Image (cartoon, rainbow, N blue to C red):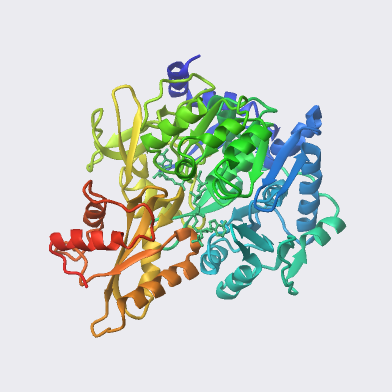
């Protein structure tokens, strides 16, 4: 059956479609139905089934005789380490950690925060939580203590699992001081922390801390605990309009069914093949396609600790693909832009045998045509753009290679996946015709695996996603659909920006800038960047009478954002202005500012350190009548 027939089959009978997909999952008690409509826009999937995520991702493959198959390949060019972990070993390690957590009092439903770099133990920690029905919340290592503290207070974890350090090129990121700092700031205090000591850094342990190896050596291994289909598998915080992150909840049953379905239908891999998503466990791509999707489907996944360039060179991706015989590769366009910048002619590709690679998938930000065409030419395989969000957990639109390779239209993430009725709406909520720009909305209900609510914040869930267009989920993206049904994602409709494939809130940055004693008012916008897609740019209005040098204040606010949000914010550009462009009612015209900075005549410098950018923006704003310093 081709794409259009598959999509039509879902449209005709969604219940039958998902019940059939659910047969690929091992249930303790099979669900009697797929969808439970709870009314008022809320729904749950496979709510009356019982199952266990870790059983499906690990144990069932061992039981099926695949214990010797490699589950995880660890490849860390930054340390020079490589390792292979079989499904049997993964089961033993996961059961041991799960047993340790149970011995320390972790019970189903308890939250556990995981603050780990890209090491296999990060996956072991996630799976160990799933094994005992604990709800994990992974926090990206590039966030600062204050951001971790916000998540601790919202998720109220009983335990935190962390490593002693992460490794960035040229620097060891000591996690323990960040962790202790976050717990100091947070009102909620976890009962204990499990610390994985890495060779590169030995963390100072306190009475609250338990050594990972001591814990796993002594405890009895834990079995999988069956949980209800609507039991939260995890919470993953993502950026919204304000500084407070949104805790996206993922339910167990739908998550298993949807991810397993995508592995063949979207990514076109069969069990046993190597699937590599070069992302980080702290992001949704890491959850869905480094950890859960490939393991549930019985693939081999790769945990890669490094960067696309500089560790050691721009051939790293090709070396990993060749050495580990990767069949399907997933990364963010920004990573390819980084490689292209270092090796535009793809000279390094010739050194490697990439014959196992069948397709490359891009997501996380807009895939610019230049990058797609470059990758296509260099690699000679389909380069598939696909569009999704933390909220959805898997692709809303893609080219479903396992169903049918649709013609590729460069600039489009192709077509809606079964489960998603994607529509373009005008401001009044009415549908617009083909090729017309509007808000992208998805008719409810959302499919299995997508967010049922926000953690502790149902009212915010409704307000953020369900209110603007009654009966629809508001994606926060704007775009259009052409007459062939291909989607085009053009921009965000809120204050979220996308920096190097990382989703960030300009509102959160503004809250930090406003804390500076000399700042009276501020705005942060995203401006185009040739490498990272977008970069945050801050505008500061100072308090009357402030006569300190502006560059000093700019340096201080840059340091403040790094300290409060973290290096991942990549906030390195700010300038002082006399006033901000506003509407008569006092609303800051961020969109106008973005247009000025992003207009075609505005030349973005190649590097963010180039001071020309500030001059260009100053000049552009001045021509619009805004006086600057
Ligand atoms: N822990 C601590 N710090 C981190 C970090 C982590 N896990 N990840 C990134 N950082 C730091 C970086 O060291 C950098 O610090 P610096 O300002 O001191 O240089 C800062 O955060 C910004 O990081 P990033 O925006 O990633 O820039 P980069 O120069 O390190 O790398 C790319 C640029 C394009 C190579 C890199 O961003 C990349 O590979 N992106 C792909 C993103 C991705 O996979 N997204 C997930 C969706 S698929
Ligand atoms: P995240 O929740 O971090 O995955 O970020 C989701 C957002 O990233 C989306 O709402 C889009 O704004 C953007 N995004 C993700 N994938 C794509 C894509 N293929 N094309 C354009 N934008 C994308």
Q: Relative to 180, does residue 111 appear above or below in the rendering?
A: above
Position of 162 with respect to 249 (left or right) is right
Q: Relative to 32, does residue 407 appear above or below in the rendering?
A: above
Q: Which residue is drawn at 52% across and 31% down?
A: 360
For this rendering, which residue is in front, 537 or 424? 537
Q: Quadrant of residue 180?
A: bottom right
Q: Quadrant of residue 18?
A: top right
Check the picture and name the quadrant holding the C terminus.
bottom left
- Which residue is situated farthest in the top direction here? 1
| Residue 229, percent from left and from top | 61, 40
Position of 60 with respect to 547 (left or right) is right
- The tally of labels here is 0
| Residue 456, percent from left and from top | 51, 58
Position of 90 with respect to 435 (left or right) is right
| Residue 304, percent from left and from top | 63, 45
| Residue 582, percent from left and from top | 18, 63
For this rendering, which residue is in front, 495 or 141? 141
From where the camera sits, is residue 426 visible? Answer: yes
Position of 614 with respect to 111 (left or right) is left
Q: Residue at x 36, y 81 (%)?
A: 517
Q: Relative to 61, does residue 583 appear above or below in the rendering?
A: below
Q: Quadrant of residue 287?
A: top right
Q: Residue at x 75, y 74 (%)?
A: 207
For this rendering, which residue is in front, 103 or 285? 285
From where the camera sits, is residue 188 visible? Answer: no
Q: Residue at x 72, y 56 (%)?
A: 107
């Amino acid at each position: 059956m081709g794409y259009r027939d598959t999509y039509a089959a879902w449209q005709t009978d969604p219940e039958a479609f998902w019940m059939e997909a659910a047969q690929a999952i091992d249930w303790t008690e099979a669900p009697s139905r797929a969808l439970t409509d709870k009314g008022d826009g809320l729904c749950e999937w496979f709510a009356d089934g019982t199952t266990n995520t870790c059983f499906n991702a690990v144990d069932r493959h061992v039981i099926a005789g695949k214990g010797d198959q490699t589950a995880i390949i660890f490849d860390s060019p930054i340390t020079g380490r490589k390792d292979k972990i079989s499904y049997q070993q993964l089961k033993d390690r996961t059961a041991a950690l799960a047993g340790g957590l149970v011995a320390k009092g972790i019970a189903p439903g308890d939250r556990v925060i995981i603050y780990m770099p890209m090491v296999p133990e990060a996956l072991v920690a996630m799976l160990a939580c799933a094994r005992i029905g604990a709800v994990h919340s992974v926090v990206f290592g590039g966030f600062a203590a204050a951001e971790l503290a916000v998540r601790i207070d919202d998720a109220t974890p009983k335990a935190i699992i962390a490593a002693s350090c992460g490794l960035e090129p040229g620097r060891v990121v000591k996690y323990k001081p960040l962790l202790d700092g976050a717990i100091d700031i947070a009102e909620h205090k976890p009962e204990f922390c499990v610390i994985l000591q890495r060779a590169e850094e030995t963390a100072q342990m306190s009475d609250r801390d338990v050594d990972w190896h001591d814990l796993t050596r002594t405890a009895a291994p834990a079995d999988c605990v069956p949980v209800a289909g609507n039991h939260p598998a995890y919470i993953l915080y993502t950026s919204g309009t304000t500084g407070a992150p949104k805790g996206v909840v993922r339910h167990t049953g739908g998550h298993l069914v949807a991810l397993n379905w995508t592995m063949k239908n979207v990514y076109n891999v069969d069990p046993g093949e190597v699937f590599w998503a070069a992302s980080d466990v702290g992001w949704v791509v890491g959850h869905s396609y480094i950890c859960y999707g490939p393991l549930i489907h019985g693939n081999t996944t790769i945990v890669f600790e490094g960067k696309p360039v500089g560790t050691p060179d721009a051939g790293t991706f090709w070396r990993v693909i060749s050495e580990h015989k990767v069949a399907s590769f997933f990364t963010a366009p920004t990573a390819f832009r980084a490689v292209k910048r270092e090796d535009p002619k793809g000279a390094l590709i010739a050194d490697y045998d990439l014959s196992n690679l069948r397709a490359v998938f891009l997501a996380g930000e807009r895939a610019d045509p230049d990058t797609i065409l470059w990758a296509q030419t260099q690699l000679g395989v389909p380069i598939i753009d696909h569009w999704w969000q933390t909220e959805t957990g898997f692709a809303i639109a893609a080219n479903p290679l396992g169903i049918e390779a649709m013609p590729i239209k460069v600039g489009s993430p192709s077509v809606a996946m079964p489960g998603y009725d994607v529509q373009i709406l005008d401001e009044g909520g009415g549908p617009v015709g083909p090729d017309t720009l509007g808000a992208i909305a998805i008719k409810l209900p959302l499919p299995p695996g997508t967010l049922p609510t926000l953690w502790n914040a149902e009212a915010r869930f409704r307000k953020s996603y369900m209110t603007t267009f009654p009966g629809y989920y508001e994606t926060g993206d704007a775009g259009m659909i052409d007459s062939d049904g291909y989607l085009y994602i053009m921009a965000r409709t809120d204050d979220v920006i996308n920096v190097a494939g990382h989703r960030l809130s300009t509102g959160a940055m503004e809250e930090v800038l406003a804390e500076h004693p000399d700042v009276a008012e501020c705005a942060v916008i995203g401006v185009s960047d040739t490498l990272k897609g977008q970069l945050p740019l801050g505008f500061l209005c100072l308090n009357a009478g402030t006569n300190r040098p502006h560059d000093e204040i700019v340096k201080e606010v840059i340091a403040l954002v790094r300290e409060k949000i973290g290096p991942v914010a990549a906030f390195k550009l700010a300038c002082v202005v006399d006033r901000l462009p506003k509407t008569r009612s006092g609303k800051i015209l961020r969109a106008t500012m973005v247009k000025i900075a992003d207009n075609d005549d505005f030349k973005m410098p190649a590097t963010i350190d180039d001071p020309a950018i500030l001059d260009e923006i100053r000049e552009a704003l001045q021509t619009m009548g805004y006086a600057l310093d």
